[in-house]
Amino acid sequence: MKQLKHMAGLFVLLLLSVYSRAQSGPEEGTYFVVNVATGKALAPVDGGINSNIRLKKFNRGGMQKWKIKKYTAKGKNGSMIVSYTIQNATSGFYLRPYFVPDNHEAILSDKDASSSFSIDADEENFVIKSIKMGGDALYSKGVSTGDDEPWFGPNEDADGYRWQLVPAE
């Protein structure tokens, strides 16, 4: 009987652990996605399909608003899998990596299947990783002139890979 109680207690701890990991990302909502290193916000160059995304001065403009939607599913081993889509609130198109071997720039897509991310809390910031790109993280790739470019690459644990999700009111 004592062993059964111990196993029941371990089961409850396991469930709480899975639940807390599933809750470690952001809540669904509309946000400004701001890079910690630059203080600039994600914004498409224009509202069309395959438009490039840039990091622009954070001005709370309409093109800087992104809808984040959360999806949960059970994995093959019964664990909870959480993923997110990131959709531009103005154009309705989705953030995604540009899938070519030598370029992993962020662009807009009309398909939500290409916008599949994990968003993990990292202290008060978030790390946004592309599921379709094997977990490569969104980061600010500085350019010599003009606006910074958001790209996807291996997480280097630096501020350029960290994002604040500022609620859009």
Image: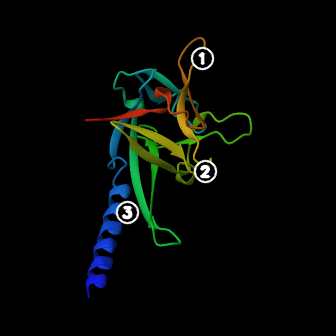
Residue 138: x and y in percent read: 53, 36
Q: Mark 1 or mark 2, which is nearer the start of the sequence?
A: 2
Q: Residue furthest front?
A: 2
* Mark 3 to mark 1 CA distance (whole Å): 40 Å
> Disc 1 residue type?
Val
Quarter of the picture holding the N terminus? bottom left
At 35% from the left edge and 21% from the top edge, which residue is drawn?
Answer: 59
Horizontal relation, residue 159 to residue 50: left or right: left
What scheme was used to colour the molecule? rainbow
Residue 133: x and y in percent read: 62, 47
Residue 132: x and y in percent read: 60, 50
Residue 19: x and y in percent read: 33, 62
- Snapshot quadrant of residue 109: top right
Q: Nearer the viewer, mark 2 or mark 3?
A: 3
Disc marking residue 18: 3
Whether residues under marks 2 and 3 lie with C-beta atoms below 8 angstroms apart, the answer is: no
Q: Which residue is mark 1?
A: 143
> Disc 3 residue type?
Val
Whether residues under marks 3 and 1 lie with C-beta atoms below 8 angstroms apart, the answer is: no
Give the vertical position of 5 relative to 160 (above or below): below
> Disc 2 residue type?
Lys
Q: Which residue is mark 2?
A: 132
What is the secondary structure assignment of the residue under circle 2? Answer: loop
What is the secondary structure assignment of the residue under circle 3? Answer: helix
